[in-house]
Image: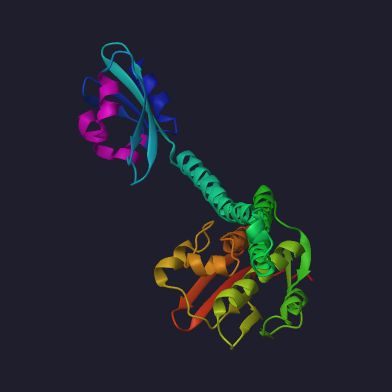
Amino acid sequence: MAEYAKQLLSLIEIPILLVQGDRVNFANAAAKALLGGHIEGQDIRIALRDPEALKLIKSPEGGRAKISGLSVRGSVWEMVCSPLADNNRLISLQDQSVQVSVARAHADFVANASHELRTPLTAILGYVETLSDPKAGEDAATRQRFLDIIKREATRMQSLVSDLMSLSRIEAIRHEAPSDQIEMVSLCREVIGERLREIEVNFITNADKAHVTGDHAQLAQVIRNLVDNAEKYGGSDKGTTVQLEASDRGWLTLAITDHGEGIAPEHLPRLTERFYRADTGRSRAAGGTGLGLAIVKHIVERHRGRFDISSRQGEGTTATIMLPQDKSV
């Protein structure tokens, strides 16, 4: 019967241990993969090294405990200890790392969004209160200066809410592959044409037409966000370059380059995180919400593409998108 039980436990995909006293009598394949093939016969105190978990194993009632760093640093596992006959314990381990990470990311997102909204809202309320004072409100120059600040902060809030809603919509359909045929050369010209009165954009392409399977509005938003970023942080009279290149390997590469101050290497891996800013003061002064690159990343992932940012300080930054071409057209 014992051998039959072990055979059944071997089929379970989560780590399972049978412990008698302080010794591990049995470990299934998942447990050996997690804790090492030598786990059978080992002292459970050496295998787990978690005071709360070991205390639970010794208790007659058993129960649940959280163990941190069991597989890799930062991982979180839930241990369930069930008492059996003859001083045996059945221990199961469930990886909770993803759930914990998602919950933490959600809490951070809500906290960051609240902070980003609270800052302009506090400024608006403060200036409205000041304008309510007859002495400040009667002075035309002061009144106009305060109204300009209120308008700027309200516009900032409006942009932030718009980006939050956009990000929410993108995430809601991120697993649904787009199905429309989009001609990228004309789309680039369309989006760039919207900005030519404000900034100098140099468009280069090696194709007359290049198609992808995609979502027109979302791909336009990607180009618009990246061109806006180049304008805000380029800080140069050399303008922005948008280059679209169709390759024989089935990929379409879109690169947006500015000639600004560039970004320090330590910031590059985190630029697509929500609300992350390499230069907080400069970003807010330029009207950035901290969500633009996160939106780009999610859209590109939905289109089964790749997104990368490279930069050299003092020379500029290039944001590159690679999308699979639609060769059926």
Q: Quadrant of residue 153?
A: bottom right
Residue 54 higher or lower than 258, as above or below: above
Nearest to the observer: residue 119 or residue 41: 119
Nearest to the observer: residue 45 or residue 217: 217
Position of the N terminus by quadrant = top left
Position of the C terminus by quadrant = bottom right
Q: Does any portion of residue 215 appear in the rendered image?
A: no
Q: Residue at x 70, y 65 (%)?
A: 221
Q: Position of residue 79 (x, y in %)?
A: 37, 28
Residue 246 higher or lower than 94, as above or below: below
Q: Quadrant of residue 201?
A: bottom right
Q: Position of residue 242 (x, y in %)?
A: 64, 80
Q: Does any portion of residue 67 appear in the rendered image?
A: yes
Residue 311 higher or lower than 88, as above or below: below
Q: Position of residue 136 (x, y in %)?
A: 63, 60
State the extent of the magenta-drawn residues as a range. Answer: 31-58
Q: Is residue 214 left or right of residue 234?
A: right
Q: How are the colours assigned in the image?
A: rainbow
Nearest to the observer: residue 243 or residue 167: 167
